Amino acid sequence: MTFDPEAATRAHIDSLGPEALAKAQAYTTGNHWLLLWGLVVTGVVTWMIVRWGILDRVAGRCSRRGPNLRAFLVAATFFLVSALITLPWTLYEDWWRERAYGRTSQPLGDFLAQGAIGLALSVLLGALFMMGVYALLRRTGRRWWLWSAGLTALATSALLLAAPILIEPLFNDYQPVPPGEVRDALVVMAQQAGVPTDRIFVYDGSRQSNNFTANVAGLAGTARIAISDVAFKGASLDEVRAVTGHEIGHYVLGHVWRMVIVFTALALVFFWLADRLYLRFARAFGSRAALSDPTSLPVLLFVASLFGLLAQPAFNTLIRVGENEADRYSLETVNLPDALASALVKTAEYRYPRPGALEEFVFYSHPSVERRVRRAMEWKAAHGGR
């Protein structure tokens, strides 16, 4: 009997059952609406902080300090105050709703404790970055936006370099894959791809999420591949091999560096637009702050949020290209199309597998599961595998 990729694809997706598919669709559609509501929340917070004059008072008290320290303190105040104002929204979006859909089992206390750590890092790193941006605004004149894009490239690279060793361990426990047949198989795969065998980890991702996931992070000597314990415990050996092959594809193909380049290019466009549009948005929010004044930060970051939302289809398209390349790498090197397909179906629980073409283009950072499974089944028909 001739193998039918289309029928095999339907069988894989339908294995979830109609109830799970309907739940995944509701969850995914809700996530799309949250993007719009998130922008509305950002606009309200921007208006509140500008109207209350919080940053103006902080800037006034720091008027005798150096401009860099003044910018740092104003930015730190903004990040802290905005996080506190949006805490109810954050609780709804990132904890309550996730629990309602069964995507997390994290207790509220642990969520808040980890949120406090994240807030401290955001305040510190965000304030340092904005201190640099405002220094460039003062010193480089009309070309500040070009220099700020360069600063973004440096900051992004430094953050990616440091994240696996300094930041991510604050939230999760990363351990080498334990001895056994899984480790033996992954060591062989890593050696064949030229990936250091000590850079493949399993981490307690179930602490925050019930999602079946794995990732690649870091740059150069800090680069590593990490598999959530959800995937590690809930997958067969072949599925782990197929998923790891996908992540090794990201590692070998240099997708992290590509993201640095893409993010820097988007930052360049954003800063250029901000240079030309800031005053219009400032007037709309009732702010009289010049762009070079740190008290312009709320309006500047609202413009960033709006730009990020509008640029999402382009950014998502570039990410989908990388995901397709990593899938192909897994198929070419591991040749387990059925295992890759069944692993992908597990991700359909939180990413509806059958979106419309427009929905996928605008909102999906990964190709639809149905599309990815079909490609795996087409690979199986053309090249064999199991």
Image (cartoon, helix red, strand yellow):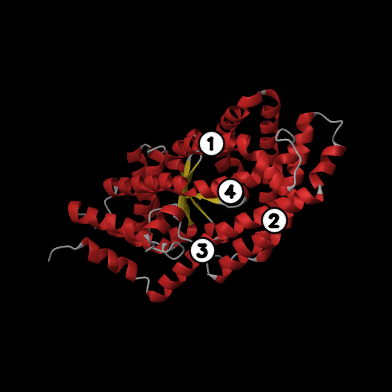
Residue 135 lies, in percent from the top left, at: 70, 28
Q: Nearer the viewer, residue 218 or 69?
A: 69
Q: CA distance from mark 4 to mark 3?
A: 30 Å
- Residue 227 falls left or right of residue 90: left
Q: Secondary structure at mark 3?
A: loop
Measuring 48% from the left and 33% from the top, which residue is drawn there?
220
Q: Which residue is mark 2?
A: 44
Q: Earlier in the sequence, mark 2 or mark 1?
A: 2
Q: Which residue is mark 1?
A: 269
Camera sees residue 178? no
Q: CA distance from mark 2 to mark 1?
A: 25 Å
Q: Earlier in the sequence, mark 2 or mark 3?
A: 2
Q: Nearer the viewer, mark 4 or mark 3?
A: 4
Q: Which residue is mark 4?
A: 306
- As drawn, the label of residue 210 is 3
Crowding near the residue tagged with mark 2, few <14, some 14–19, many ≥20 C-alpha atoms within 10 Å: some
Up-down: is 133 above or below 14?
Answer: above
Crowding near the residue tagged with mark 3, few <14, some 14–19, many ≥20 C-alpha atoms within 10 Å: many
Residue 165 lies, in percent from the top left, at: 57, 41
Q: Nearer the viewer, residue 257 or 338?
A: 257
Instruction: Identify which amino acid the numbered label 1 is placed on.
Output: Val
Q: Earlier in the sequence, mark 4 or mark 2?
A: 2
